[in-house]
Amino acid sequence: MSTDDDYPNAFSYDTFDECAENAEKIWILKNAIALGEDSTWFGPPGCGKSALLLDMAFHIANRRYHWQWHEFMYNEEDPSREPRATVYFASERANLTHNRMGAYKTRYNPVPLPIAVVSETINLLDPACADQVVNTVLKFEGYTGCRVGLIIIDTFAKAIAAGNGDEDKALHQNMAATTLKRIHDRIDVHIATIGHTGKNAAAGERGSNARLGHVDLAVQVAEKGKVRTATVVKANDQPEGLIAAFQMEEVTVRRKWEDGTDREPYTTSILAPYDPDIFKREARPAVSKPTTGKQARALDALTRAIAERGQDGAVHLEFWKEELTRDGLIKRNDSNPRATFSRIRKSVQHLIEEPDDGQVRLKPEPGQIPSCPVPA
């Protein structure tokens, strides 16, 4: 029988049974961030991409049990799911990242948190960069005693340009992706990169689409007035749709010198505390414009029922019926409310979906991404 020594240059591999046995996804934040994966968070300038990821890092490091509505997978009996540190490579606006750290300390006054900010520029086109990133992570783990679970690269385009690369070139995108793969080969982390949209935000992330082919998760961040949204537009094996909805909040930071005199205060913006009502409003699926006023009222009633009592973007038919009764579309003295309800459902059947489990949901418009589960 042959042994491993007979094939000294062979690659290691996992068999069919080994793959099936080890097929487990280890979440840091459930349905958001998993170990061993890459994600891209992109949008136009000023939409809150960097602030959103820094807020995520703060919640993970502070051992908070939820970020937005995503459960933090903390389990004292399972060391693979312990609280994780973050290393933030701020190749763009490092001073702003530092200032935001001060804002979190002012608002929450937490214990020292395992978050490190690297202000030096990294070059993802240089194969040696993988060693630099890994050694930085290991050094910080030794300093804090906490394992790093999240690496943030802000921005991916700057990390390519540092090597005289072009984000529009598939070759350079793939070279950078190879560097990320080398990092994953050595440490068990999630790598989140920040990117930009072009002039046409609907076209997705700026640059070669080789980027989208590499990542496990792609999230588009957008600004709608005061509300910012983060929507999963590509995912390998988790729900697509709304992942976060948030607003920004100004925080004034006041500090003192060692001799007790006041330092110059500064003001910066970080994410306002999570508001589930904002998420619920943004998570309501859009529908095609109805043809009659009664159809509009019926669909509004369904939207309210989903937002208030639904799960996974759907609600039981009885809850919709109750909402229709409250709205007056089904009269309380109706001699046959079941028949009236049936007529209403039939009038909007082209705008709703009814699975076999007694649930009902709104049909997304063509091209619209179905919503993520709405928190209770």
Image (cartoon, helix red, strand yellow):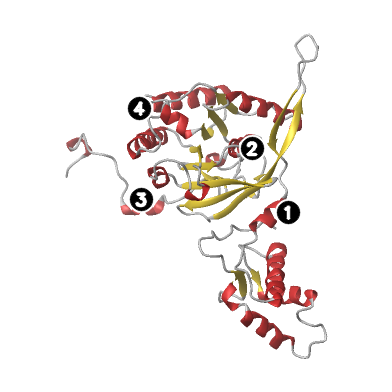
Q: Residue type at mark 4? A: Pro
Tag 1 residue: 277
Q: Which mark is in front, 3 or 4?
A: 4
Tag 2–tag 1 contact (CB < 8 Å): no
Disc assigned to residue 127? 4
Q: Position of residue 121 (x, y in %)?
A: 48, 23
Residue 112 position (above or below residue 167) = above
**Location of the N terminus (image quadrant):** top left
- Taking the view exactly as shown, the residue that stands out farthest to the top is 259
Say left or right for 239 vs 257: left
Q: Residue type at mark 1? A: Asp
Q: SS of the residue at dot 2?
A: helix
Q: Which mark is in front, 1 or 3?
A: 1
Q: Position of residue 8 (x, y in %)?
A: 20, 34
Mark 2 vs mark 1, CA separation in Å:
19 Å
At 60% from the left and 29% from the top, the residue drawn is: 115
- Taking the view exactly as shown, the residue that stands out farthest to the front is 199
Tag 4–tag 1 contact (CB < 8 Å): no
The residue lying toward the viewer, choosing from 316 and 72, is 316
The earlier-in-sequence mark between 4 and 2 is 2
Disc assigned to residue 55? 2
Q: SS of the residue at dot 3?
A: helix
Q: Residue type at mark 3? A: Glu
Residue 209 position (above or below residue 307) = above
Residue 165 position (above or below residue 286) = above
Can residue 236 be seen here? The reply is yes
Q: Residue type at mark 2? A: Asp
Q: Position of residue 219 (x, y in %)?
A: 53, 47
Mark 3 vs mark 2, CA separation in Å:
37 Å
The earlier-in-sequence mark between 4 and 1 is 4
